Image (tube, rainbow, N blue to C red):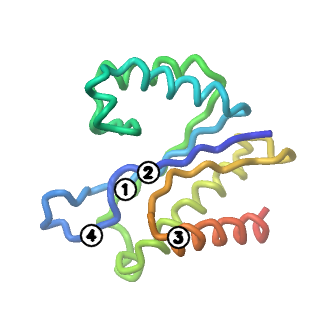
């Protein structure tokens, strides 16, 4: 069995006049043959935070964490049997049509990344694979659409 953890950084906004709009959108996949060691690293890192800080958050976000927290987590992950793959999307080079369809763009970029995983054989493809994605959207329809899109692409292409 293999596990793929998916997370993104940045936003899919294209109005660069806004202060919070990022120039890049990043999707990262972390591959592991076991889920437990990765969960332990995250839990141990979260437990290492001060009690006052823990009350403010439920999750870890690298762009908001102190360098010591990031280093602790990355150091612990480096000791595990994992692989990482990233797509770094320069939003200035995205077709105008896709800029207006953010969900389609997200699905498309994620599918490209999964295709690279398959073609480079970064995980055993003859075993069951679990994709664990961060919940990017609170909209159930968009999350379901994402799941169905990837399932369909995997069945058709692989």
Residue at mark 4 to residue at mark 2: CA–CA distance:
16 Å
Q: Is residue 103 above or below residue 25?
A: below
Mark 2 burial class by Cα count in 10 Å: few <14, some 14-19, many 20+: some
Residue depth check, mark 1 versus mark 3: number of the one nearer the observer? 3
Closer to us: 155 or 118: 155
Label 4: state its secondary structure: loop
Which residue occupies 33% across, 53% down? 10
Q: Which mark is residue 140?
A: 3
- The mark that comes first in sequence, 2 or 1, is 2
Residue at mark 4 to residue at mark 1: CA–CA distance:
11 Å
Residues tagged 2 and 1 counted as in contact (Cβ below 8 A)? yes
Label 2: state its secondary structure: strand
Label 1: state its secondary structure: strand
Instruction: Describe residue 3's horizontal placement relative to residue 94 as left or right.
Output: right
Residue depth check, mark 2 versus mark 3: number of the one nearer the observer? 3
Which residue occupies 70% across, 69% down? 153
The quadrant of the rendering that contains the N terminus is: top right
Q: Residue 14 carries which label?
A: 4
Report the residue marked by disc 1: 25
Which residue occupies 39% across, 39% down? 58
Closer to us: 36 or 26: 36
Report the residue marked by disc 2: 8
Residues tagged 1 and 3 counted as in contact (Cβ below 8 A)? no
Q: Where is residue 42 in the image (x, y as percent from the top left)?
A: 50, 28
Instruction: Describe residue 143's horizontal placement relative to residue 116 as left or right.
Output: left
- The mark that comes first in sequence, 4 or 2, is 2
Q: Is residue 20 above or below residue 101?
A: above
């Amino acid at each position: 069995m293999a596990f793929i953890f998916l997370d993104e950084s940045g936003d899919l906004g294209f109005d660069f006049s806004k202060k919070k709009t990022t120039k890049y959108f990043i999707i990262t996949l972390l591959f592991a043959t076991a889920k437990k060691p990765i969960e332990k690293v995250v839990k141990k890192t979260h437990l290492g935070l001060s009690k006052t800080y823990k009350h403010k958050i439920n999750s870890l976000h690298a762009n908001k964490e102190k360098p010591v927290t990031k280093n602790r987590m990355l150091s612990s992950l480096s000791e595990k049997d994992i692989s990482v793959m990233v797509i770094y999307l320069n939003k200035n080079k995205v077709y105008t049509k896709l800029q207006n369809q953010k969900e389609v763009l997200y699905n498309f970029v994620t599918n490209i990344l999964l295709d690279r995983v398959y073609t480079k054989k970064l995980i055993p493809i003859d075993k069951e694979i679990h994709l664990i994605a961060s919940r990017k959207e609170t909209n159930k329809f968009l999350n379901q659409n994402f799941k169905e899109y990837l399932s369909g692409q995997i069945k058709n292409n692989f």
